[in-house]
Image (cartoon, helix red, strand yellow):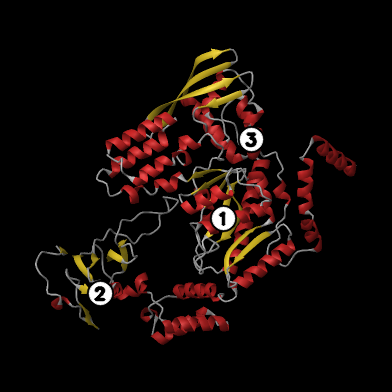
């Protein structure tokens, strides 16, 4: 057995000093001492080269100062083979064989590094003659990097230069990197090349955009020395989309940090298809209260002082304080997903962590009423002696801001977390990266937004030109099939399917007001068993009012299977109009679709510019016509006269 752990015997450090010889490398041993993490890595990679295997770093643990306290260097074939192929009949090759060969490295009190455990056994064939192909050995030295940049600037093609490097080295096998690594480095160098003058280029870009479309909005915040500090902008289409979908937004600053360390701060909503829609965004130099106040005030100016109706953000005291100050009347809540992701960090050290985690998840996600949540929470705290846990106490104090049972009575367009903005951020991944410069980011932002609009246009086309077949004969389903967009109608059909699990009975009836009990059966987490959930449904036949304890309609704007079950039992064949939301309809032409964005291209005709200059007047006419019935009729008559 070649896996050894550090014994209690004293080890003579001098005897274990590494001797790196050109043709020979000493095998790793328990007790070896290294001066730095880089020295450990270089030693193990050199050792791996001689034996013929690749190296990867695993199981890293850092101290509070960011430096390593523990890590392992393992054979590159460490870990189990897991296929990531979408089609199981066409599996992708995997290099993993669950090889156990590795060394563990810990940091000593004096800052040096020691190996407390070694495993030398490999479960695969070693290939000393092919080590140049392992990723850990593909290193481009500074001389070659400089030549790559100069050749690229001079217009010399990469394949010519790479071939010369191969000839110079005496063959491909003697070159410690491939053409792909050279290509990746050149791409990175190009992206880093625009450094000086980025702020000015960004400002010029905004000027051009506003000249092309007067409804393009931006604000730039400079410090006392005239250096760029914060930026906020929104194009004409995004501003107009706020009219249709501004009922709920998500906000976070967790995604992009470019070469100037400026967090990306998008304001994101959801459109009629349930897709992410960007209203505006900012680039911030700081994440303190004053910066967020500046950003939110910029938003108010951009959106003509129309405050946010509802906002979802993550647990950040600075953001929460700025929201309370700038949007005092807005309904805001915290991201439940972000909070639950902290469980391991906050409670992982407790002896009964797994049981606490399960109980807490059940309390948060399965409680149907305030009383049920309160009871489960108190039982959890008492059973595991968590009365003095500050984090849990703070969560309980803010429960009305994040626990589903407290927030589901308000409309959130189905957005339960800030993962809506995270999905928007993922959309930008193909266009920007951590080293993108300011000017490049805004230009790529335009390309990403074009792609987003095209995706929405395709979904519109699909909803207008095709029909999703009904799954029942109920006229209620036909009513939603006729007016709802495809994605939302699919969600409604899920509720129709849920009817088979609902058992409805009347509790009491007083005149036109009735209360029903609906026993619903839902699959457990493993999908194997059904859990019974009881919901009460209130129905006022005279007023056409329906309410369910699950509050799905209030939360997402879609009728739940419990209400549908009651309507069917009461022989209600038509859903009252107030339960069909305009924001999910496909037969409404929304104002923002008339806004044709003029991006940073140079192919804009004079006629197109004139049309965009008239867009602000259209907004003013809409506002004028909505003020009263007479003004609406006046504009309507003018339109008819002009048409004839």
Q: With 269 as the anchor, is 400 left or right in this view?
A: left
Residue carrying label 1: 293
Assign a secondary structure to mark 3: loop
Q: Which quadrant: the C terminus?
A: top right
From the viewer's perspective, tell me whether residue 327 is left or right of residue 27.
right
Look at the numbered disc 2 and give the secondary structure of its residue. Answer: helix
Q: Nearer the viewer, mark 3 or mark 2?
A: 3
Q: Secondary structure at mark 1?
A: helix
Task: Indicate the position of residue 158 as horizontal and vertical percent values.
Answer: 51, 79
In the image, residue 431 sits, relative to residue 41, either above or below, namely above
Name the spot of residue 192 as percent of width and height, x first: 52, 74
Q: Position of residue 609 (x, y in %)?
A: 78, 61
Q: Considering depth in this image, is 614 or 22 the residue closer to the camera?
A: 614
Q: How many marks?
A: 3
Residue indicated by mark 2: 47
Question: Separation of disc 1 and disc 3 at Cα?
Answer: 33 Å
Depth check, mark 2 against mark 1: the one in front is 1
Give the mark, 1 or 3, whose residue is nearer the N terminus: 1
Question: Which residue is pictured at 36% across the width and 31% down the height?
Answer: 375
Left or right? Give the position of 619 relative to 172: right
Depth check: give the residue in front, 307 or 201: 307
Instruction: Pick the residue in front: 569 or 624.
Output: 624
Local packing at callout 1 (Cα closer than 10 Å; few below 14, some 14-19, many 20+) is: many
Residue at image position (20%, 71%) is 28
The span from disc 2 to disc 1 (Cα, nearest Å) is 55 Å
Q: Can residue 76 be seen by looking at this rendering? A: no
Whether residue 164 is situated above or below residue 424 in the rendered picture? below
Q: Which mark is residue 581?
A: 3
């Amino acid at each position: 057995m070649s896996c050894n752990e550090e014994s209690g015997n004293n080890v003579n450090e001098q005897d274990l000093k590494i001797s790196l010889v050109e043709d020979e490398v000493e095998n790793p041993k328990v007790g070896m001492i290294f001066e730095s993490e880089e020295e450990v890595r270089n030693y193990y990679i050199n050792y791996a080269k001689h034996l013929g295997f690749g190296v990867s770093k695993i199981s890293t643990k850092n101290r509070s100062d960011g430096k390593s306290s523990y890590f392992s260097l393992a054979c590159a074939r460490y870990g189990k083979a897991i296929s990531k192929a979408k089609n199981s009949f066409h599996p992708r090759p995997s290099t993993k064989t669950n090889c156990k060969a590795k060394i563990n490295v810990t940091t000593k009190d004096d800052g040096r590094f020691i190996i407390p455990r070694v495993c030398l056994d490999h479960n695969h064939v070693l290939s000393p003659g092919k080590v140049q192909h392992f990723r850990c050995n593909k290193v481009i030295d500074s001389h070659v990097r400089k030549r790559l940049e100069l050749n690229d600037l001079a217009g010399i093609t990469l394949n010519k230069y790479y071939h010369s490097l191969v000839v110079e080295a005496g063959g491909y096998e003697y070159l410690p990197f491939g053409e792909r690594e050279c290509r990746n480095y050149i791409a990175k160098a190009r992206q880093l090349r625009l450094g000086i003058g980025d702020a000015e280029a960004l400002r010029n870009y905004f000027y051009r955009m506003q000249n092309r479309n007067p409804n393009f909005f931006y604000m730039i915040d400079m410090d006392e020395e005239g250096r760029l500090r914060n930026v906020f902008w929104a194009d004409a289409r995004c501003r107009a989309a706020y009219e249709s979908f501004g009922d709920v937004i998500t906000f976070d600053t967790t995604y992009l940090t470019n070469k100037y360390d400026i967090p990306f701060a998008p304001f994101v909503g959801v459109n009629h298809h349930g897709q992410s829609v960007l209203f505006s965004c900012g680039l911030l130099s700081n994440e303190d209260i004053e910066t967020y106040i500046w950003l939110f005030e910029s938003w108010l100016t951009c959106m003509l002082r129309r405050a946010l109706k509802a906002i979802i953000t993550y647990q950040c005291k600075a953001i929460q304080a700025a929201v309370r100050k700038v949007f005092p009347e807005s309904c805001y809540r915290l991201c439940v997903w972000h909070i639950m992701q902290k469980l391991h960090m906050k409670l992982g050290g407790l002896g009964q962590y797994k049981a606490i985690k399960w109980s807490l998840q059940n309390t948060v996600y399965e409680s149907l009423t305030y009383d049920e949540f309160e009871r489960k929470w108190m039982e959890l705290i008492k059973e595991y002696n968590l009365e003095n846990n500050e984090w849990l106490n703070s969560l309980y104090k803010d429960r009305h801001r994040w626990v589903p049972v407290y927030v589901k009575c308000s409309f959130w367009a189905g957005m339960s977390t800030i993962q809506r903005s995270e999905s928007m951020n993922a959309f930008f991944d193909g266009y920007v990266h951590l080293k993108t410069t300011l000017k490049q980011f805004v230009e790529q932002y335009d390309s990403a937004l074009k792609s987003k609009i095209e995706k929405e246009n395709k979904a519109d086309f699909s909803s207008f030109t095709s029909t999703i077949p009904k799954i029942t004969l109920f006229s209620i389903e036909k009513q939603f099939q006729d007016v709802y967009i495809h994605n939302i109608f699919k969600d409604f059909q899920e509720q129709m399917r849920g009817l088979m699990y609902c058992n409805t009975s009347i509790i009491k009836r007083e005149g036109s007001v009735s209360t029903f009990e609906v026993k619903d059966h839902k699959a457990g987490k493993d999908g194997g068993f059904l859990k019974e959930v009881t919901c009460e449904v209130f129905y006022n036949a005279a007023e056409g009012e329906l309410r369910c304890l699950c509050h799905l309609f209030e939360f997402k704007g879609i009728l739940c299977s419990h209400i549908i079950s009651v309507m069917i039992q009461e022989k209600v064949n038509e859903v009252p109009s107030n339960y069909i939301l305009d924001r999910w309809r496909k037969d409404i032409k929304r104002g923002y679709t008339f806004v044709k964005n003029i991006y940073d291209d140079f192919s804009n005709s004079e006629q197109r510019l004139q049309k965009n200059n008239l867009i602000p007047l259209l907004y003013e006419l809409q506002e004028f016509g909505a003020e009263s019935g007479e003004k609406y009729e006046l504009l309507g008559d003018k339109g008819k006269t002009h048409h004839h």
